[in-house]
Image (tube, grey):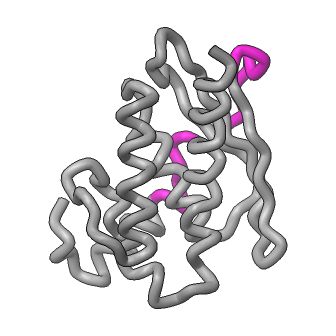
Amino acid sequence: MPISLSPQMMRQIIMDHYENPQYKKTPANKEAFETLHMASANCIDDINVYALVKDNIIKECYWDGVACTISTSSTDIMCGLVIGKSLEDAKYIIDQYNHMIHEEEFDESVLDESIVFVNTAKQAARIKCATIGWDALEDIICNHHHEK
């Protein structure tokens, strides 16, 4: 997905994931999932991220809780991006997303719809909103490796 998306298209993708999140749910068998709770002191964001990891592959990924538009859409997009990916590939995607958010060089080819957050650094107060779910999944991945 090219960075040349118009601002209107970017807003539409964000609003689509905010109004109709595909991955917002608490899994019925949540004890099978690795879970991390995240909250922001500066926003309403108070979420749980759930990842079902088998054979170092993220089989399922969901989130639930209360979140602002940016957190909701970025976390929802993230879940869709990492399902079916190895932990190493998911970590690479997270790293590239964080590079993009912090205006560093990044590999656009792995970011798909998350590219809509390319201008987040211009609103510094929104960086935490755009990364809260990603930070949770990164911690889950790191903790998973330490459990081995």
Nearer-the-camera pick, 53 or 30: 53
Position of 1 with respect to 118 (left or right) is left
Residue at image position (69%, 26%) is 34
Q: In which quarter of the image is residue 90?
A: top left
Pinpoint residue 47: horizontal percent, then vertical percent: 75, 51
Instruction: Point out the residue furthest to the bottom here.
Output: 122
Nearer-the-camera pick, 61 or 100: 100
Pinpoint residue 30: horizontal percent, then vertical percent: 75, 22
Residue at image position (39%, 65%) is 99
Figure check: 109 above or below 24: below
Please say whether residue 146 is visible from this viewpoint: yes
Instruction: Point out the residue furthest to the top here.
Output: 55
The segment highlighted magenta reads 17-33
Nearer-the-camera pick, 18 or 36: 36
Q: Quadrant of the C terminus?
A: top right
Give yes or no for residue 89 being in the magenta stretch: no
Q: Quadrant of residue 105?
A: bottom left
Position of 64 with respect to 78 (left or right) is right
Total labels: the figure holds 0
Q: Quadrant of the N terminus?
A: bottom left
Residue at image position (44%, 50%) is 94
Pinpoint residue 23: horizontal percent, then vertical percent: 55, 40
Figure check: 73 above or below 3: above
Please say whether residue 24 is visible from this viewpoint: no
Give yes or no for residue 19 being in the magenta stretch: yes
Residue at image position (52%, 50%) is 76
Q: In which quarter of the image is residue 72?
A: bottom right
- In terms of secondary structure, what is the magenta stretch mainly? loop
Pinpoint residue 123: horizontal percent, then vertical percent: 53, 88
Position of 39 with respect to 102 (left or right) is right
